[in-house]
Image: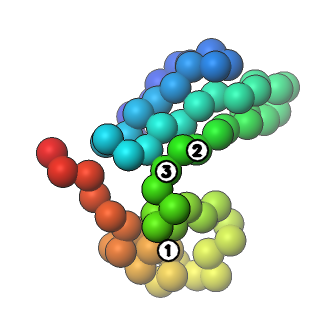
Amino acid sequence: MLVLSRKPGERILIGDQVAITIVRIGPNTVRLGIDAPRDMNIVREELCADKGEEAELVANRPTAPR
């Protein structure tokens, strides 16, 4: 796992198609903005019904060319 420190307004780039912006940092929360192609499925982990569904989402996730 990569752990990064960022300040509000700073971005993290994932491949050529995904950018995560730190919108706000609160006492117990971080608000993120995610810019990604519409066909990319982005789901909060707790919304996955079970680990099998999570594994399927990861397996079907598009990968950026290296």
The residue under label 2 is 34
At x 54%, y 44%, the residue is 35
Report the Cα–Cα distance between label 2 and label 1: 19 Å
Label 3 close to label 2 by CB (< 8 Å): yes
The residue under label 1 is 54
**Classed neighbour count for the residue bearing mark 2: other residues with Cα under 10 Å, few (<14), some (14–19), many (≥20):** some
Q: Secondary structure at mark 1?
A: helix
Q: Position of residue 53 (x, y in %)?
A: 51, 82
The residue under label 3 is 36
Can residue 55 be seen here? The reply is no
Q: Secondary structure at mark 2?
A: strand
Q: Kindly identify the amino acid type of the residue bearing the numbered disc 1.
A: Glu
Query: In the figure, residue 62 lies in which quadrant?
Result: bottom left
Q: Kindly identify the amino acid type of the residue bearing the numbered disc 2.
A: Ile
Say which of marks 2 and 1 sits in front.
Answer: 2
**Classed neighbour count for the residue bearing mark 3: other residues with Cα under 10 Å, few (<14), some (14–19), many (≥20):** some
At x 76%, y 26%, the residue is 24
| Left or right of residue 15: residue 19 | right
Question: Count of labels shown?
Answer: 3
Q: Kindly identify the amino acid type of the residue bearing the numbered disc 3.
A: Ala
Query: In the figure, residue 18 lies in which quadrant?
Result: top left
Q: Going by the picture, which residue comes out furthest to the top? A: 7
Report the Cα–Cα distance between label 3 and label 1: 19 Å
Q: Position of residue 57 (x, y in %)?
A: 45, 74
Can residue 10 be seen here? The reply is yes
Placement of the N terminus among the 4 image quadrants: top left
